[in-house]
Structures are given as structure tokens and as C-alpha cells.
Amino acid sequence: MKMTKRFLTGTAAIAAFAASMTAAQAETWRYAFEEAITDVQGVFATKFKEEVEANSDHEIQLFPYGTLGESADIMEQTQAGILQFVNQSPGFTGSLIPEAQVFFVPYLLPQNSEELNEFFRTSKAINEMFPELYAEQGLELLAMYPEGEVVMTTKEPVTGPSDLNEVKFRVMTNPLLVESYRAFGATPTPLPWGEVYGGLQTNIIQGQENPMFFVESTKMYEVTDHITFTGHNNFTTAIMANQQFFEGLSEEDQQMIQDAIDVAFEYILDYQQGLTEESLAKIKEEKPSMTVTRLSEEQRAPFMEAAEEVEAQFIEMTGDSGKAILDQMKADLEAVTAD
């Protein structure tokens, strides 16, 4: 009943479209994502659209963040077949698929971009285990990819967990991310993204985390004064299709979609090279007073110690299934980081 009410309050044109034809019959496919068209997810979506339209008679209609609601809205619309494609971080999908929260275990993913990219290309956990979990929610997992190192932006400088004491730190509505920042010493405060800028401006919250390009594009630097590279994570996202829609396509169209995903995947990995430094330079130009701190190994040590607690909580939350995913990811990571 709750889901029905949410759909009825959505865009009338989309509801009419859903009533008039099934997703598999649509000549125009709808694709929503969580960022602006010029951000990483938007660049990926644009490349995917170009490939699909160049190699088929189908058209892709793109819906950047906010045009169809918040993250929960676009996921519900995809599961219902109103949208054919959605790009969403496991940070939000974790409420549906608890194992997806593994991407928020701090210090699990490498910061070396070549190793990280190879992991996403070859990981058995990502390419074989996660698709089964997503399928249980009516979703066809097409790809996961990294978006960049996560940084903290705060009102006061951060050099260790003690600096986060009593800091109300915005997190996504993700149980493990809440536990991560609690372990880091902060007061984790889940907020929808649309409320973050105002929350920082009015001091309801005093910090948030995101990749550098997103800090720059959303102007988070205007309402915070310090950027800290803790090395604790790399933001991950996933592109999915409504499973019923995808299975209703011809084998030719399914392969065309996967080929377009593969092209967009490699394109976005290349696109991100140097993006963090470019975004940081733009921020420094706009706000010269912004301080940037890259924690040393010694300074990271207490954060890494806290990460062990978070990993144990992940296993407690997800049981044997989560442990199997985590163990496989560690094996996959070892394979790409071994000399």
C-alpha cells in the first residue's frame, strides 16, 4: 500500500506511461541516476545513451538527480518497471540488499587506481555473487564501478577520531555507514541529500563525506572549511535494469545493452583519471581559505583500527551470506594487489 501511494504522488506523465505499455515494449527507455548530468554517473549515463542509440533503434531518456525524487523513489520506480535503468550507490541499495553494505567497510578497497579498476573488472564477488542477490529484488545488475576516493568535509580540521567527537556527521541512510562513523567517534546523522547543504549552512550537521568531484559540483566547500583525505573508502555505484524488462528483451538487445555498459564502464574509468585533483584545484580557486589535509599512515592508524570493529558488525548484520561476500572480495583484492 505504501509503495502504491508513493507512485500515485509521482510524475503524472510517468504514471500514464506505465499504464499504457509494458517496459519491455518501450521504444524509449528511461534511466535515472543520483547525480547531475555533468557528474560521474551522468557522464556514464550519457556514454551509455550514445552507445545504445548508435547501435539500435531505441532511445534513452535520462533523469538526473531530483527530477524523479530521491534515491528511494527511483529505486521503487525501477522495481515497478516505470524506469528501465537506475544507477544507485550500494549506500542506498543496502536497505534492500544488506550484503551491498560491504562497500562501506573502511579500508577494504585499495586507493591505487589501477588495482581498484582491475578489481572491479575481475572480481568474482561483483560479477558472479552480487547479480544473484540483486535478482532476488527484481534487478538485473549490469555493472558496478568506482567513482573516486571519499573525502570528509568538515567545519573544523580532522587529524584523528578525537576531532570527530560530538561532530554531527551526515551519512546516507545505511546502517553500516552509521556504524562506521560511530566507530570513528562522530555522531552519525542520516539525512536525504537534498537537506545536506542547508544542514551544514545552519550547523544542524558539521560534516559530510563524498568523492571530491561531488564536493566541488555540489558546492559543499561553501559551507565547510576543511577537506580531509583519510583513505578510508572509494565511492562505489551500480547500474541496474528492471529484471522483467531485461529478460523480456531479445538476446540481441540484451547483448547490445551489455556492450554499451562495457564501453561506458571503461570510458568512466578513464574519465576519472586526475578528476580528484582537478576538482580540488577548482575548490581552492573558489575558496583559497579551504584547508586540505592528507592523513599520514600514523594518523590513519586509529581509523583503521576502528574499521576492524565495523567489519565485525557487517558480518553480524549479514550473516553467512555477508561473510561469503566479504571473504570473496578479499580474495579478489589479493589477486589484483599481489606483486
Image (spheres, rainbow, N blue to C red):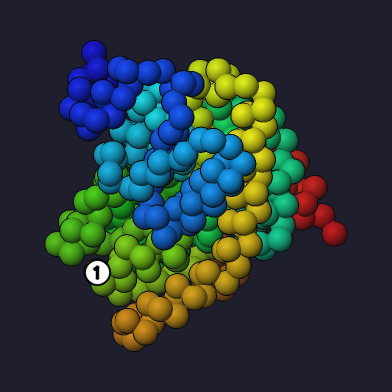
**According to the image, label 1 marks what residue?**
223
Identify which residue is drawn at 37% across, 77% down. Answer: 283
Q: Is residue 296 above or below residue 73?
A: below
- The residue most toward the top is 1
Say which of 117 and 43 sits in front.
43
Identify which residue is drawn at 40% across, 78% down. Answer: 282
Q: Is residue 293 above or below residue 24?
A: below
Say which of 323 and 151 sits in front.
151
Residue 158 position within the rendered picture, expressed as x and y whole percent measured from the top left:
39, 70
Residue 332 position within the rendered picture, expressed as x and y whole percent measured from the top left:
74, 43
Q: Quadrant of residue 15?
A: top left
Mark 1 nearby-residue class (10 Å; few <14, some 14–19, many ≥20): many
Q: Amino acid at mark 1?
A: Val
Identify which residue is drawn at 40% across, 41% down. Answer: 61
Kindly tell me whether residue 165 is visible in this rendering.
no
Residue 150 position within the rendered picture, expressed as x and y whole percent measured from the top left:
48, 59
130 left or right, relative to 26: right
Identify which residue is drawn at 49% across, 51% down. Answer: 46
